Image (cartoon, rainbow, N blue to C red):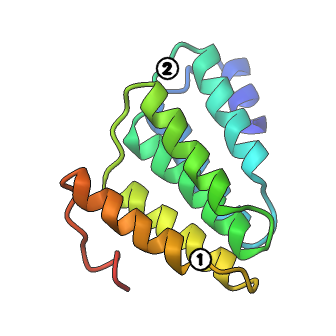
């Protein structure tokens, strides 16, 4: 958020790409327990305040924030599902990157001893129903 404030002070206007980059940075920070899902949503709110529409890239990066938080034991599969619901409400279609990040949420949850295999299989079925082909990362 400090970056956005500094940009505004300098007369620069952030773009969708700016916000996507910030979200990607948060994802890396979340995987090191240095950022939270709530911070990801705050970036999304700041984007909306500027009348910028989030894209699949934006939401995939937010999902990566959830995945990083899940690896730290601070997010759940439900948190990932909420990102998908948010996308749907805004008319943004999930893509293979979004679903791969959701699968990473399942892995993070499983690393903390919670059963996630049924949810992961349901995600693969959802991808199939949406005609989204898995890629090498999906099965990695």
* Left or right placement of residue 115 versus residue 140 in this view: right
Q: Is residue 112 left or right of residue 99?
A: right
Give the residue at x 45% y 23%.
53
Looking at the rendered structure, the number of numbered marks drawn on it comes to: 2
Q: Kindly identify which residue carries mark 1.
A: 116
Please tell me which residue is depicted at 26% across the width and 80% down the height of the picture.
Answer: 136
Q: Where, by quadrant of the figure, is residue 92 drawn?
A: top left
Tell me if 90 is positioned left or right of 33 in this view.
left
**On screen, 26 above or below 7?**
below
Q: Secondary structure at mark 1?
A: loop
What label sits on residue 125 in the rendered view? none
Between disc 1 and disc 2, the foreground one is: 1
Circle 2 is placed at which residue position?
A: 52
Quarter of the rendering containing residue 71: bottom right
Can the viewer see residue 45 in this picture?
Answer: yes
Give percent across and percent down for residue 4: 69, 30
Label 2 secondary element: loop
Q: Is residue 133 above or below residue 84?
A: below
**Front residue of this view, candidates 21 and 124:** 124
- How far is disc 1 from disc 2 in space, using C-alphas? 34 Å
How packed mark 2 is, by other alpha carbons closer than 10 Å (few <14, some 14-19, many 20 or more), is: some
Q: Residues within 10 Å of mark 1 (few under 14, many from 20)?
A: some
Residue 25 is at least partly visible in this image: no
Q: Position of residue 37 (x, y in %)?
A: 73, 50
Q: Which of the two labelled residues, at mark 1 and mark 2, occupies the earlier sequence position?
A: 2
What is the quadrant of the C terminus in the image? bottom left
Residue at 77% over, 74% down: 72
Q: Is residue 82 above or below residue 64?
A: above
């Amino acid at each position: 958020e400090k970056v956005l404030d500094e940009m505004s002070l300098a007369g620069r206007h952030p773009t969708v790409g700016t916000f996507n980059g910030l979200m990607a940075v948060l994802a890396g920070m979340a995987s090191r327990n240095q950022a939270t899902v709530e911070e990801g949503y705050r970036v999304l709110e700041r984007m909306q305040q500027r009348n910028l529409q989030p894209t699949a890239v934006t939401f995939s990066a937010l999902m990566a924030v959830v995945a990083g938080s899940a690896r730290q034991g601070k997010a759940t599969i439900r948190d990932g599902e909420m990102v998908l619901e948010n996308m749907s409400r805004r008319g943004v279609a999930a893509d293979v990157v979004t679903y791969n990040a959701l699968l990473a949420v399942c892995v993070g949850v499983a690393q903390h001893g919670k059963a996630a295999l049924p949810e992961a299989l349901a995600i693969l079925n959802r991808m199939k129903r949406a005609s989204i082909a898995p890629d090498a990362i999906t099965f990695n």
